[in-house]
Image: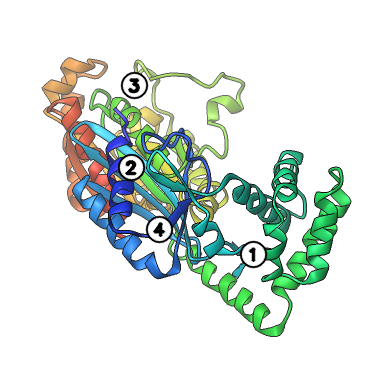
Amino acid sequence: MISTNNFLYNFFKNLQNENIRYSVLRNYEGLPNSLNGSDLDILVSKNDVSKFYDLLNQTLELNNGKIIVQYGKLTPRVCIAGVIENNYYGVQFDVHEGILPYKVFDMFPVEFVLDRSKLHNGILVANDDDADILSFLKEILNNQTCKEKYFLAAKKSWQKDNIYKIELKKMYTKEFIKQFDLVMNNTYDEVKIKELSILGSKYLTNGINKKVKILKSKLERMYRFFKTPGFIVAVMGTDGAGKTTIIDKITEPLKEAVHNALFYEHMRPNLIPNIAQLFGKKKQEGPVVDPHSSKPSGIFGSLVRLFYYSFDYIFGYLLKIYPMTVKKSSIWIFDRYYYDYMIDPKRARINLPQWTINTMGYFIPKPDLVLCFGADPKVIFDRKPELLLEEITEQVNKLKEFCDKNDKAIWIDTGKSIDDSVKEAFTTILEKMNERY
């Protein structure tokens, strides 16, 4: 069960009690009960940033939660998740640390927004008119265009109150304010909007010192290539060990925590189709009923299979997985992984000496975490008697041996209740993701 109610309610209550100056900038309608599938975009006064993070950590500790992703400066992305009894939650914060930035420069007056914030269900949120002007500015400066709905909302707010001219004059040139006023007092015109965006961008970024700051910011972002915000989890276990059930239950709160940037893959990156599809066979949907029904290929066929799928692991990672782990706070969950070839090569119809499969394994990109699901072989057999008890026993023993030797692998006993197994798997992922920070 997913519930952000307790965490969000407690968090905002603590913000109020500590007198921290903040304002939720958008998507506040469901607060404090829900974010309605959105992230939490929050502006915090520069003087209260440290107190804000201290309070966030305290609230997480009291609500059995963890920070699982945190990256970026000025407006860091902070992803959190936790579980209280059997209630799971996940939230993504975009924290504006005393700045409403375009690149690394303030594009809108922070104190103005904070001072004019209003109460919504006991939560401080941005004045709607301020939010409309800010959204329009953000769109045009970053994209040199905007959707008409942003323009119309900003136009209505601009014409309602002369205060925006006064406030923006403190930050921009007279020429920009004049052009802004001209755009706001006419119909939607993409050419004029682009001219306005260029004028604003030029003013905010012109000058050697400003160029140096921008370059420094870009260089700092390159750190993400070496320590990616994304995270890769491989889930291992024989049929009947509970993989599908547990993955299904932990997916939604993790998806909320990274704002939908959760991706599921079966076995491999799937950059290329499986061999059967190359010969015109349809891709099998749903679980495999009899994984050992097909005979293993011969030596040559097995080598082709091993090298073909290894190509997918290596280049699928480089071209599909890795770029997304660098770009955003993504989580990738693999149901099985290359290690399955080592433990159960019959499933992939590979008939090769173990050392051949193990040697190729050195070249395969490694997940950040491997969850090994296992239980008493008799329990697994009773759940799903698709393999002989002897085969299940052999696979469980091989998986346990693999888990003991792999420093990124964690054993999860799925012989207990499903709720306990789900909670252990979920909290293990949170702990391992949190360890990075």
Q: Split into 4 quadrants, where in the image is the N terminus?
A: top left
Q: Are marks 2 and 4 in contact (CB under 8 Å)?
A: no
* Amino acid type, callout 4: Gln
Residue 111 position (above or below residue 305): below
The residue tagged 2 is 8
Point out residue 394 in the picture as x, y percentages from the top left corner: 18, 32
Q: Split into 4 quadrants, where in the image is the C terminus?
A: bottom left
Number of the front mark, 3 or 4? 4
Q: Which disc is residue 107 wearing? A: 1
Q: Secondary structure at mark 3?
A: loop
- Specify which label sits upstream in the sequence, 4 or 1: 4
* Amino acid type, callout 2: Leu
Q: Nearer the viewer, residue 183 or 1?
A: 183
Model colouring: rainbow
The residue tagged 3 is 292
* Amino acid type, callout 1: Met
